[in-house]
Image (cartoon, helix red, strand yellow):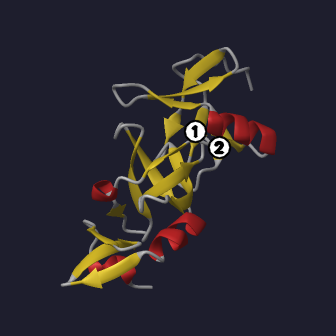
Amino acid sequence: MPARWHTREDSGIRLDRQFRWWHDGEPIEHPNIIEAFNKGVRVADDGNVTLHFGNDWCFFEVEDAPFKIVAVDVSEGERLSVRLSDRTGEWLDVDALRLDDDGVLSTRVKDSKAKARFGRDAQFQLAQFFEVASGVVHLRIGARLEATPLPLSALED
């Protein structure tokens, strides 16, 4: 088979729904490369995502979300923050919470320019804050109760 020439526009790199990296249909398995790729994801103002690796960059295919939420934290000011796969953190956008058909939560990150899916552990952490009041799913954070746009089915197993 002839060698395939890659360009910035056609890198052959893909990030699937389970946050596995691929190159030309082969899984990327080296943990240091995975970490470097996770840290190299950038979102432009127009929402396009690029992968930065050292001084180089390229576009890559994103099957669902370019970021994974790996943990949920509570601040002393009774706010929830999320830690992302690129090793950054930001406040949880409660109004942007969504539940997909697979039962996985997501929200918007990076100034609402990108989607982030909750990893299993992070989704379990967030679920500890769920509470139903008047038929609406809320997040109980300390003494504060904040309504979410999530359906009641978000609380079903």
User: The C terminus lies in which quarter of the figure?
Assistant: bottom left
* Residue tagged 1: 14
Q: Quadrant of residue 148?
A: bottom left
- Which residue is located at x 62 percent, y 31 percent? 40
Q: Quadrant of residue 114?
A: top left
Q: Is residue 122 left or right of residue 27?
A: left
Tell me the amino acid under the disc marked 2: Trp
Tell me the amino acid under the disc marked 1: Arg
Residue closest to the eye, 83 or 143:
143
Residue count near mark 1 (Cα–Cα under 10 Å), binned few <14, some 14–19, many ≥20: many
Q: What distance separates the C-alpha of mark 1 from that of mark 2?
A: 6 Å
The residue tagged with tag 1: helix, strand or loop?
strand
User: The N terminus lies in which quarter of the figure?
Assistant: top right
Residue 131 circle label: none
* Residue tagged 2: 21
Q: Are marks 1 and 2 in contact (CB under 8 Å)?
A: yes
Residue count near mark 2 (Cα–Cα under 10 Å), binned few <14, some 14–19, many ≥20: many
